[in-house]
Amino acid sequence: MKQGIHPKYDYVVFRDRGADFSFLTRSTATSAETVEWEDGRAYPVIDVQISSASHPFWTGKSRVLDDEGRVAKFYKKYGKDPKQES
């Protein structure tokens, strides 16, 4: 492995302020801002807009965006279903 070409891989806190959720993991991402973690050490913190605590898929609060299927929308817009014409 060549020396000096790899980014620093260290502990970082990712924080989702909207969900009041943070987690400590290792990453090559870094920040000048730090936060004190539960173990008493200060780690760089990166604020994220969405995490598993606020994402609709993981929270089960997903919305249905498409009530009709694509094919049904097409037939509604352009004509009758050819299966029903026979």
Image (spheres, rainbow, N blue to C red):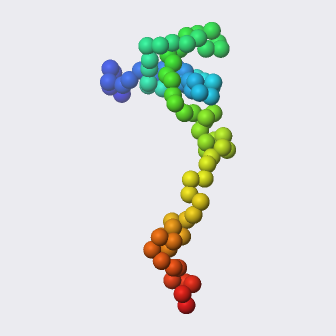
Quarter occupied by the C terminus: bottom right
* 18 with respect to 8 (left or right): right
Quarter occupied by the N terminus: top left
- Decide if residue 56 is in sight here: yes
Corner quadrant of residue 40: top right
Q: Position of residue 25 (x, y in %)?
A: 56, 25
Number of marks drawn: 0
Residue furthest out toward the bottom: 86
* 15 with respect to 28 (left or right): right
Please name whichever residue, 42 or 80, is drawn nearer the observer in this view of the structure.
Answer: 80
- Decide if residue 23 is in sight here: no
Residue furthest out toward the right: 60
Please name whichever residue, 69 or 13, is drawn nearer the observer in this view of the structure.
Answer: 69
Q: Residue at x 45, y 74 (%)?
A: 78
Figure check: 10 above or below 82: above
Q: Residue at x 63, y 33 (%)?
A: 53
Q: Position of residue 76 (x, y in %)?
A: 51, 71
Figure check: 72 above or below 27: below
Figure check: 35 above or below 5: above
Please name whichever residue, 41 or 3, is drawn nearer the observer in this view of the structure.
Answer: 41
Please name whichever residue, 62 or 1, is drawn nearer the observer in this view of the structure.
Answer: 62
Q: Residue at x 54, y 24 (%)?
A: 14
Q: Position of residue 44 (x, y in %)?
A: 50, 16
Q: Position of residue 16 (x, y in %)?
A: 57, 26
Q: Residue at x 32, y 20 (%)?
A: 4
